[in-house]
Amino acid sequence: MEALALVGLLLLYFGILFWISRATAKNATTASFFSGDKKSPWYLVAFGMIGTSLSGVTFISVPGKVLSSGWHYYQLVLGFFLGYFVVAFVLLPIYYRLQLTSIYTYLEKRLGISAYRWGAGYFILSRCLGATVRLYLVINVLQLFIFDKIGIPFALSTLIILTMIVAYTLKGGVKTIVWTDTLQTSFMLLALVVCVICFQQKLGIGWGSIFESIHSENLFNLLESNPLKGDYFWKHLLGGAFISIAMTGLDQEMMQKNISVKTLRDAQKNMMVFSVSLLLVNALFLLLGSVLTLYAAKSGISVAPDDLFPLLVQDYLPFGVFVIFIIGLISALFPSVDGAITALTASFCLDILGFDRRTYNEETKNRIKRSVHLGFAFIFMLLVFTFKWLDNKSIVDLIFDIASYTYGPLLGLFAFGILTKRVFVTPKVVYLTLLSPVLCYLLKLNAPLLLGSYQIGNEMLIINGALTLILLLLFSKKQIYAASHQP
């Protein structure tokens, strides 16, 4: 009966999202699918981006990090905060000045068609892998809690989830995503707050005593001072800053919502409110992890970090709270997938198929857009099945590592375009942007031999971007575009 109740809840949740989709997709066009008609309220975008940034993997894993490394993760969050200032006051002014729908059009205007297409290609590769890994991991949790109990196999549950997501994103695009992300962020935060309060009550002590216990158990361990470790403070801080620059400011999924806001000033307000909100929300996740760790120690429970949150909620809290947890998990899952499919559709149509260059009529554009959207959903399904078939956690970890390799060339390309006035022969960009990730992979593979006990952490993205920039500088030449061509 409990499993059937959860299935009913999932269907009700989808029904609400579909209703929002129908309401927001009225009179939708291909242009509004990609840009939201530049009418998205900045405060809704800021709030909804919280859910997009905090995927289902974050929802499950971040509380468990306290069990293994205290609050070291917050060093990375502080780095994110710094990076968002660069996004707001360096990148967004460029995107608005050039009136971009796809941010990778900047690369074409500044560096030529080859850089443009390779930049978009790196985004498509990275977002396909990253979004499907998140989808796979969360579907695994839903499979365990819901679908296995009513006899629905993994393949069918994957198809059901993807069908739901496609159904409410197919027509409205960004106009729909802005509103559904707002709703889903609200549910996710509700689940987070409820779980914190419930476990505080399960401990049976006040917040003053809880904070004393967190301090005495050394759980509130924020700074890692050993520079040889992967989570050393300055590695996390600088790595986090460049991660937010690359994976927010150079990511079509995140930026398509920002540039759907009417004015640059409102888009900058959105980024600043979002960045402060993310500091608070991540602190709440780590506080939850601290409370969970205290409760597990008090109850003599031994569990892996990633299993800490879902296991304790399922086994030690009332079913009603578990329902709220499932709502929060779904709310963390959908924004990280629906926005990805929408952004991939936009990037492929604009950057690869050249919607802005060809004289398609509206009916043809809609037909192609629908086909591309469904095509990416099919690719997502195949990748999820592949991860399930491999059933190897190390493969999942490897896919996350690939993100640092694919965003590195994007970081280098944009840095070259913004910081220099040099140009290069466009075919060279293909080889140069491929060479940098290969060199980084070889460096990581041979790190023990070359670097001894030094562990490469989040600085890999910085190394990758710097290598790309250096290679571009070496194979470029001095040439200042005429004013009419200089973005």
Image (cartoon, rainbow, N blue to C red):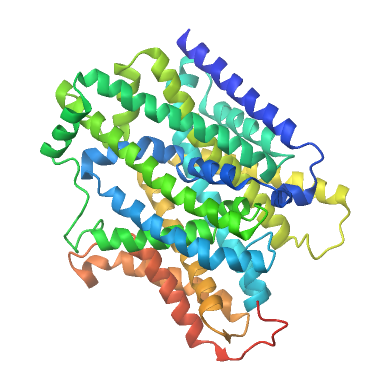
The answer to which image quadrant residue 243 occupies is bottom left
Above or below for 113 versus 268? below
The answer to which image quadrant residue 60 occupies is top left
Residue 165 rendering spot, x and y as whole percentages: 62, 34
Residue 417 rendering spot, x and y as whole percentages: 56, 77
Residue at left offset 54%, top offset 53%: 269
Q: Residue furthest left?
A: 216
Q: Quadrant of the C terminus?
A: bottom right
Above or below for 197 versus 332? above
Which of the two residues, 116 or 36, is positioned nearer the viewer here?
A: 36
Res. 380 visible in picture: no
Above or below for 35 versus 180? below
Q: Residue furthest top?
A: 1
Res. 433 visible in picture: yes
Residue 217 rendering spot, x and y as whole percentages: 12, 37
Residue at left offset 25%, top offset 40%: 66
Name the side, left or right, on which 282 lies relative to 206: right
Residue at left offset 42%, top offset 24%: 325
Residue 473 rendering spot, x and y as whole percentages: 49, 85
Q: How many marks?
A: 0
Which of the two residues, 305 or 246, is positioned nearer the viewer here?
A: 246
Name the side, left or right, on which 397 lies relative to 183: left
Above or below for 114 versus 66? below
Q: Residue furthest bottom?
A: 478
